[in-house]
Amino acid sequence: MPDTRLSEDQESLRKLVEEFAREVVAPAAAVHDEAKTFPYEVVAQMAEMGLFGLPFPESVGGQGADYFTLCLAIEELARADSSVAITLEAGVGLGAMPVYRFGSDAQKEQWLPLLTSGRALGAFGLTEPGAGSDAGGTRTTARLDGDEWVVNGSKAFITNSGTDITRLVTVTAVTGQTAAGRKEISTILVPVPTPGFTAQPAYSKVGWHASDTHPLTFDDVRVPAENLLGARGRGYANFLSILDEGRIAISALAVGLAQACVDESARYAKEREAFGAPIGRNQAIAFKIAEMETRTYVARAAYYDAASRMLAGQPFKKQAAMAKLFSSEAAVTNAREATQIFGGYGFMNEYPVARHWRDSKILEIGEGTSEVQKMLIARDLGL
């Protein structure tokens, strides 16, 4: 296991985001959750803090930190509001990171200062109505017509794709056939707005109400040929590497939600009285919260380990999958248990545990389902 002690800079950043989450994010969370509105004012303050540029070098407008530091920020935000946490995670990991990892010098110069500053958001269009875990089933196409790509198709469940500050959507599309007769999948940068591109009305979701999520359509969308991101035919492979990193960040988000459930439950168990004593004196409640805390601790250790391996240049695919699998299930379990501890109040949306309960389930689905994580782990074991 890695040394889990944070550096002075990391601890300073963690405390800064913890305070911001408590004083700014938390008070606004219930309002935006109920109204199902995007928290522009919160995101603007996150941008001023430099959170969208954390893992990028200063040469491209970033803060010069690392991916683990970003995860620390995501965890603290998720303790207050998962919608805000996923906005940062997707804006960095799915919006800016593909450009940073695979973009040309010109593409980096054009897009990274905007995305790393938080003045604009980017999105990544991978999932389609008929292609989720089987992303190789992509049906969206892009064909060269002279010096332009012409994109046609649709995408589903795309985060940060329809806000007022969305300026870029990166799209996976079939651009031909390989020598083996398989689909050649590439990634294309589509600026927003571009004629023919439409972010359809937002989804009505179970949770993440303040996160922006839309289906997208592309109807003869024309962009310059130089908007190809990375090598032609490497789009799917490149994005899989982005997903490996993203699973660590989703694990951090899940840990934040799981910890919030512990915190809320422990506080409530000390205050709520039944039969003349605080309910926390009952072993049934105390042991339940102890198990919740243990789950959270182990989940945190798992994502710390995966992040440390990634930053050290070591193989981390299996560790990222295990962290994502365990922490997402820990978040769902903790949210369910917290709701039970709160009893009838846990079913009322005025209490944060109700929101955590609704927000938790997607963590077992997004950026690779729990079943996909098990498949990756089993494959690494030679099964």
Image (cartoon, rainbow, N blue to C red):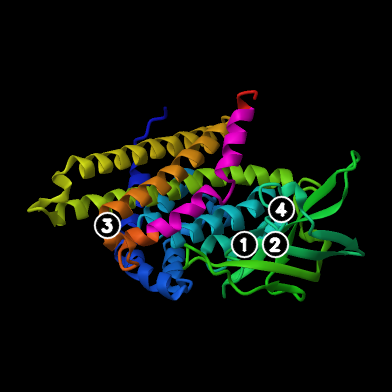
From the image, tell me which residue sits under label 3: 343
Residue corresponding to mark 1: 158
Q: Nearer the viewer, residue 200 or 190?
A: 200
Q: Which residue is mark 2?
A: 155
Instruction: Report how far apart the C-alphas of labels 2 and 4 lie in the structure.
Output: 9 Å
Residue 120: x and y, percent? 57, 68
Q: How many marks?
A: 4
Q: Amino acid at mark 2?
A: Lys
Secondary structure beneath disc 3? helix
Whether residue 246 appears in this view of the structure is: yes
Q: In this rendering, which labeled residue sits more in front, label 4 or label 3? A: 3
Residue 378 is one of the magenta-drawn residues: yes
Cα separation between marks 4 and 3: 39 Å
Q: Amino acid at mark 1?
A: Ile
Q: Quadrant of the C terminus?
A: top right
User: Disc 3 and disc 1: Cα gap in Å?
Assistant: 34 Å
